[in-house]
């Protein structure tokens, strides 16, 4: 196994989170590529894990915490570590130490760049993006929000723990139409998939449904909302994990349209 920096020849694979076999990856659109183009100019870094045959089975993306959706100073923030675990495509690379090697390489890189520590996020779930996995690598909890935990590993004694940034407000329902509002950071393929599905389904209802999408990496949008990846239908949040199917979104919007028509 070896850890390599992301180069242009592997960018398309990185943009689809190593799932070049997946129809859903194509369905998610170009959001990750667009996010990467912006974030790279702000210091985003990415590495890939290769096995002995040269097959790429894992990836990590991290950048200055000041450019992320987390509050902190002089840290690098890990957006995600992903080791391909499906039978399809390149196959299952999990349980081979790729994730640990990627994390160690990113920490070494962050120290070299003068960071005071590393931060990441995880979930209090036993099967996906586990916060407990980071704890096994010396991280501790800095902040919590629902099922999500923000974890950190200080490199110096002066380092201060990061914090979640709380949203400022939620979108309200609009009169005479059903409102579908997306807040998209662009970094996550699964979240981009949810927003693309919401956009397509909303368009099926014509002028009875108003769809708006906010790019939350835009400074003005971020200052107004402080939201990362959220979806609202008539002011009510929609759970995006896992990404809702088009059928589920269609049912939700249809119910709101029927209520609107019954007024």
Image (spheres, rainbow, N blue to C red):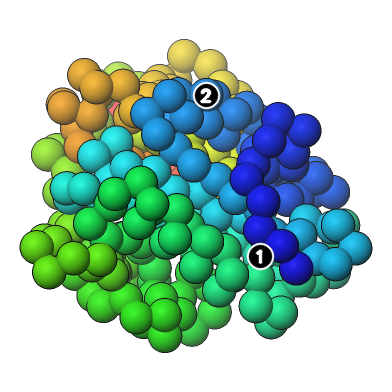
Q: Position of residue 217 (x, y in %)?
A: 34, 28
Q: Residue furthest right?
A: 53
Q: Position of residue 170 (x, y in %)?
A: 20, 38
Q: Residue furthest front?
A: 112
Q: Position of residue 45 (x, y in %)?
A: 49, 42
At a point 24% along the width and 22% down the height, the residue shown is 219
Mark 2 crowdedness (10 Å alpha carbons): few <14, some 14-19, many ≥20: few
Q: Which mark is residue 39?
A: none
Depth order, front residue of 199/222:
222
At a point 80% along the width and 45% down the height, the residue shown is 20
Quadrant placement of the N terminus = bottom right
Residue at the disc numbered 1: 83
Mark 1 crowdedness (10 Å alpha carbons): few <14, some 14-19, many ≥20: many
At a point 42% along the width and 80% down the height, the residue shown is 137
Residue at the disc numbered 2: 37
Disc 2/disc 1 C-alpha distance (Å): 23 Å
Position of residue 113 relative to residue 132, above or below, is: above
Position of residue 47 relative to residue 262, above or below, is: below
Q: Earlier in the sequence, mark 2 or mark 1?
A: 2
At a point 65% along the width and 30% down the height, the residue shown is 29
Q: Secondary structure at mark 1?
A: strand
Quadrant placement of the C terminus = top left
Would you identify the image quadrant in which residue 142 lies? bottom left
């Amino acid at each position: 196994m070896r850890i390599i920096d992301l180069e242009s020849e592997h960018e398309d694979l990185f943009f689809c989170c190593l799932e070049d076999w997946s129809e859903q990856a194509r369905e998610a659109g170009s959001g990750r590529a667009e996010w990467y183009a912006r974030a790279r100019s702000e210091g985003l870094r990415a590495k890939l894990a290769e096995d002995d045959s040269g097959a790429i089975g894992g990836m990590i993306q991290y950048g200055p915490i000041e450019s992320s959706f987390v509050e902190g100073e002089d840290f690098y923030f890990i957006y995600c570590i992903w080791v391909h675990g499906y039978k399809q495509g390149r196959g299952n690379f999990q349980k081979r130490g790729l994730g640990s090697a990627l994390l160690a390489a990113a920490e070494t890189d962050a120290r070299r760049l003068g960071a005071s520590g590393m931060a990441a996020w995880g979930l209090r779930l036993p099967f996906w993006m586990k916060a407990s996995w980071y704890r096994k690598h010396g991280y501790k909890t800095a902040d919590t929000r629902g099922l999500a935990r923000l974890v950190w590993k200080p490199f110096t004694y002066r380092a201060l723990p990061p914090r979640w940034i709380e949203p400022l407000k939620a979108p309200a329902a609009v009169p005479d139409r059903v409102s579908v509002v997306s807040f998209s950071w662009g970094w996550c393929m699964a979240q981009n998939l949810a927003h693309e599905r919401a956009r397509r389904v909303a368009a099926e209802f014509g002028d009875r449904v108003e769809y708006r999408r906010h790019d939350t990496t835009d400074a003005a949008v971020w200052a107004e909302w402080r939201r990362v990846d959220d979806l609202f239908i008539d002011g009510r949040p929609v759970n995006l994990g896992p990404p809702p199917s088009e059928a589920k979104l269609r049912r939700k919007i249809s119910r709101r349209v029927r209520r609107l028509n019954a007024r």
